[in-house]
Structure formats: structure tokens, C-alpha cells
Image (cartoon, helix red, strand yellow):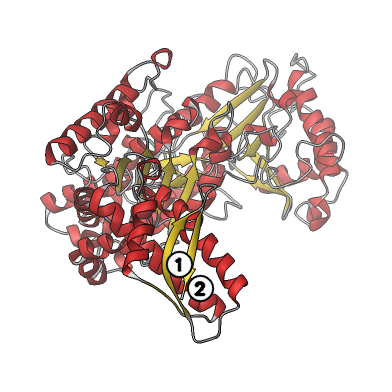
Amino acid sequence: MTNGADDFSVIPAAAGQPRTEPTRFLTRAESGQKTSGRFDARARSVPLWLRSIHAGLSAAALFVIHGSIRDIHLIDPELTDRAGVTVDTLTAIGRVLEANGFDGLLLYDPLDGLRLIPLSQRLGPERIAQQFADSLGAAVESVDCADYANLDRVCDWVTRARQPRSETDARLALVLDHTSQRSDSTRPGGDLQRVMLASLKAANQSHEPGRSFFHAGYRQSSLKHPVFWLVDKTSDLPPWMSVGDSVRQVAIPLPDLDARWRLANALVAAQPDAAGNPDQAKQLVERLVAATEGLTLKGMMEIVQFARAAGGLGQGVEEAARTYRLGVSENPWQGEALRERIAAGEAILERRVKGQTRAVRRALDLVKRSALGLTGAHQARPGGAPRGVMVMAGPTGVGKTELAKALAELVFGDERAMIRFDMSEFSQEGSDSRLIGAPPGYVGHGAGGELVNAVKRRPFTVVLFDEMEKAHPRVFDKFLQILSDGRLTSGTGETVSFAETMIVFTSNVGAAEAAAVGLLGDDSEESIAAYEDLVREAMDRFFRLPRSQGGLGRPELRGRIGDNIVVFRPISGAIARELAERFIDNALTRVAVECGLPVWITDEANAKAVAAMTAPEHLSAGGRGIALALEPVLVNPLARAIFAASPSAGGLTVLDIARTEDGGYDVVLG
């Protein structure tokens, strides 16, 4: 029971656990807690959102509480000296109401109906229940029964409850919880809308004596009646519920650094890892605070439990935080199997990507760094950025996408562990919403975005953004957030972590300039070095120059990428011939498998096919151009010959390849 306008104190939960069933609050008298503490709106130990409620009670009658309403909160000024300092949202609101002279709290939720929770001993539970029952025309014994799950009774109480006329009348407040989960929360009509209208009408009524039905009496000005709506986000209620001088929106944010630090001190102090070792305890606190950035206080407590179950807080803080964020206990980035594959990585990658030794080695260095957790090693502690990021730059058809697939197979054991986005599909205004999902009020809201849904389903993956320069500039805002924070918030408000992904961009920037100065077909070391320098300079200009000059105008994104630009050399010379022979072998093998017909090719015919496939007009498109040239040079004439000759199952041999008068090709079979 309070005896002053500013008295405020907190009854902590037992042993650091949140009060999950706040069916009744202990008064300070019942708990034996001293009442010398006073509510100080400037006190660091009182969260800002609670201070906002305290200040708003004298001016507002309807409160929309949104945000982290399911989290726990620290409100004890003696946090660092005592355990058991966390309370849930409803308990915290009850403490503020008690400090302002309210006797009870009416709690409604769709599952349990309407309940009466006493806040003080000023009148006693019986008197509070009796007045509540009288206002509903019910018997006092039935005030908690399931009959009052009907929202019509809640609406009746809001509109009929009378003002306390004497010190013997109870002062009550109403809290409506779990209304976000009702599908009709924003739909016109229905019992929930009637309660909204009733509470809004009551909030906007005059509060002259004799007309308001709540009056605390402990302040010089009258306290208007408080109705609290607990919602996940403000869009769960109609827009008109947030309009008016008597309405207050109060956001409960994620805990800041100070709150996480204070809870970490209390949690670490109770762990055997830190017993008798202040230095180790301080390090554990720092690690726990760093690993839980962006998480709730309830999440911090869960992480500590995970770490203890895994062998101790000192051994697994970061791993427990990763498990909590992703919901996946296995970590493909750790283990001997990955180390063995990376040790043989160069040979594995070069079997799939021909003629790109420098690019393969550079990419493999980045993978090794990522596997060891050394990305961002300049920082004192690991951040939340992706495991690795690289830009694969070079002309088309040189193996950039193929190397990304090979990296996915190398790290995660399956090339399908790669999510590919063609940025030419995201060149229009508003296309960025496809990545994260449509905002509220737009078609598709609630379905999520293509990118966030894919990473949520498979948090360990290679994310490939192909031909990044074709994306709309607004898409690069999402790239910046991913590379900086390692997370992205979907259109539904869900945060998805990219901390275990490898981000790969591909780009053709600089290829046209290299072709213009004749560097694409020269195999000399001097030309290759000049080509790589030209591509890097072109990438720098692309990020730095404004859009009016053909650039992106986002130098900060270039800073996030750093030196992780892997330049692919053009396909020419011996590498082009090797690819052509490989494609020819694949085609002949395909004929044998699909048609059951063995096919051989003579050295002379093979040399002619290779020469035709590696002509300059085909090399301009790299390996893709060589592959496309295989069809007119060999596949099409071979198919015609097979149908015309009806060969026996013994097989056939391609003796020669000849040009036709119309510029095509024919094969001579034997």
C-alpha cells in the first residue's frame, strides 16, 4: 500500500525468474519490502516506457502499449546487489498503477476471459471484488468464471462503471491482452470493436467531478481512467485508436546496452564459472552483452541456460547465442570435416572452375578466414556481420556463378545450399520489397520476403546476388544493412540473422572497358595484371560516382566490402580450348546415355570443332559462348546425321566437320 503520490517500489520475482502467471501481485506490506523508495521519473533503474505511463496517467485515459510486450524488465534500483530483479510487462504496469493509488487491475484476454487482480490492501480483495461484481450486476462469487470471457461484459463494464465517490470505492484499471492474435482486431464491427469504441469514448469524455469513473485522488489533478491495450504492433489496432489528446502510444523497445549489462551482471554472479574470480566474471559479462545485441532480456536468460547445459557459461556464450538466434544446434562452419575439405579446396574448386587459379585461391582464402571466425578480426570481439562477403568481378561466362556453387558445396556439402537472386529482376522502383516482404496495408503483407524467408529456412547458406549493378539503388540499402548488422527485418517485423551466411556478389563492371582496350584476349602476365587493375578501378568508380555519372553513389557500401574483390580473368587460349574439349566430351557422353549409341570423334574432327567453338566471336561471351557454340558446330549436325543414317547399335565415328554453303556445319560419319 502506498502513502504518497510518488511512492514506487518493485517486488522482484524469485531467483531471477520472470513472473509468468501474474494472477495476483504482492503488496509491499505483504512482501515485507520497505516503502522508503520513491518513484523517480529520472531513475535509470525505471525503464522509460514505465516512466511514460506514470507521467501520462494524469493526462491520458487510453494507452496503446506495443513492442516487446512479452519481454521481462528490470526495475529494481538495487539490481547489482540482489538477484530476482525481473518482472513481466503486466507486473510492471501493476506496480506503476499501485504507486498511483489504484486498488485493482482488471485483466482480459481471449483465452481466460476477465480476471480481477488486487493491487493493494487498502480496501481488501473482498471489497474490490464486490464493487466489480456490482457494476456488472453479478454475484461476487462469479467474477472470475468463464462466463466473463464474453467481450460484451467487458464493454458493459467500461461504459457503466461509476466514478469512486468515496474512499471506500475501489479504483480500478483495465488491461486487454492478446488482442493482436484476434483476426477481427482491425475489422469493423464485432465485440472487440465495441470495446475499442467504448474505451476511446470514455477516454475523450470530460473528467469533471461526478463524470469520470476513475479518480486516484493522490495528485492535484484528477487521474483519468486508464484502459491499456497490449499489442505487438500499433497496426494491430485501427488507426483511429491512436488519435486524440487522451491517447498515448507507449513503445517497449528492445533492451539497450545498459539493461543488458545490468542483467548480465546479475546472471553471471549466479554462475559457478565466475565464482571467486572477478576478472573472469567481468569477461563473461562483456561476452554475454556483446553476444546478445538485439535480443530481449528473456532471450539472455535462455542463452545462459543453453550455455550451462552445454558445459558452462565460460565455454559457450557465443555458441549458445547463435543457437538461440537460429534455432539450429549444428554448425557446419565448425568441425574437422570442413577443415579437411578446405585443405583440399583448391583442387576441388579448380575441377569445376577452369583457368581461374588466382580467383580460386583468393576466394579460398576468404573461406578459410570465415571458417576460423576471423572476419572482422580487427574488432575486439565478434560482431553480427555475415561470415564472409566477396564480389566476383569479370566478364560474362568466366565461372563466377559456378565458383559460388562450388563454394556452397565445399563449405556446406551441397551446391543447393546456395540462394541465387538475379538482380535484373530487382531493377524497378519498389522491387526491394520482394526481398523483405510487403509493408502493412499492401498486397502480400504477412507472407514475408523472398530473401528473408529463404535465409530463415536455411541459415547456413551462400547468398548469391548475381549482376549486382542491375539492381535498383534502394536494393543496395538492404545490402548495406546485411553487411553492417548481419540482419534484416522483414515486412512483418521479424528480424532474420545473416550471421552464418556467406554473401557473394557478381558484377560485369569493367568488362566493357577491358574489351575496349583489347585486354580480354591477351594471356600475357602484363595484360592480366593490367586487366585486374582496370576492373578494380572500375568497381571503385561504380560505388563512388553519383548516379548521374553512371555510378551508384554508395561509397559506404564499398567500405563494407573492403578488399574482398575477386577478379576473374577472361577466357582465352589454352583455357578456352580445354573448355571446348570438355564440352565436346560431355555432348558425346550424353548421346551414348540418351540414345544408347556410342559415338567417337577423330582427332582431326575434334580439332576443327575446337577451333570453331573458340573463335573470337564466341570468346566474347566467355565459357558460356563456347558452350553455346557447341550446338551449331557439333550437336545439331550430329543429330541430323543420326536420324538420316539410322546407325546400328554398334556406334559411329565423327570423321570430319565441314562448313556448309549457308554458314552452318555438317558432320561426316563413318
Amino acid at the residue labelled 1: Ala
Left or right: where 581 falls relative to 246: left
Q: Element under label 1?
A: helix
Single out the residue that lies furthest toward the bottom: 650
Above or below — where is 547 with respect to 109?
above
Residue 376: percent from left, percent from top = 21, 42
Visible in this render: residue 64? yes
Marks 2,1: beta carbons within 8 A: yes
In the rendered view, does 542 fall on the left or right side of 188?
left
Q: What residue do we see at 42% from left, 35% from top?
A: 468
Q: Which of 457 and 571 is in front in this view?
A: 571
Residue 14 visible in the displayed image: no
How much space separates mark 2 and mark 1, taking CA atoms?
Answer: 6 Å
Residue beneath disc 1: 587
Q: In this view, does 78 lie above or below 309?
A: above
* Residue drawn at point x = 37 percent, y = 37 percent: 507
Task: Provide the residue designation for mark 2.
Answer: 591
**Is residue 19 placed above or below 539 in the rendered structure?**
below
**Closest to the observer: 168 or 310?**
310
Relative horizontal placement of residue 226, taking residue 354 as reference (left or right) = right
Question: Residue shown at 38%/52% (left/top)?
Answer: 612
Q: Give the crowd class for mark 1: few <14, some 14-19, many >=20 residues within 10 Å.
A: some
Measuring from the top left, give residue 197's x and y in whole percent. Answer: 81, 29
Q: How crowded is mark 2: few (under 14 residues within 10 Å), some or many (20 or more)?
A: some
The quadrant holding residue 556 is top left
| Residue sitting nearer the eye, 43 or 402 | 402
Total numbered labels placed on residues in the image: 2
Secondary structure of the residue carrying numbered label 2 = helix
The quadrant where residue 461 appears = bottom left
Between 558 and 549, the one nearer to me in the picture: 549
x, y percent for residue 479:
41, 35
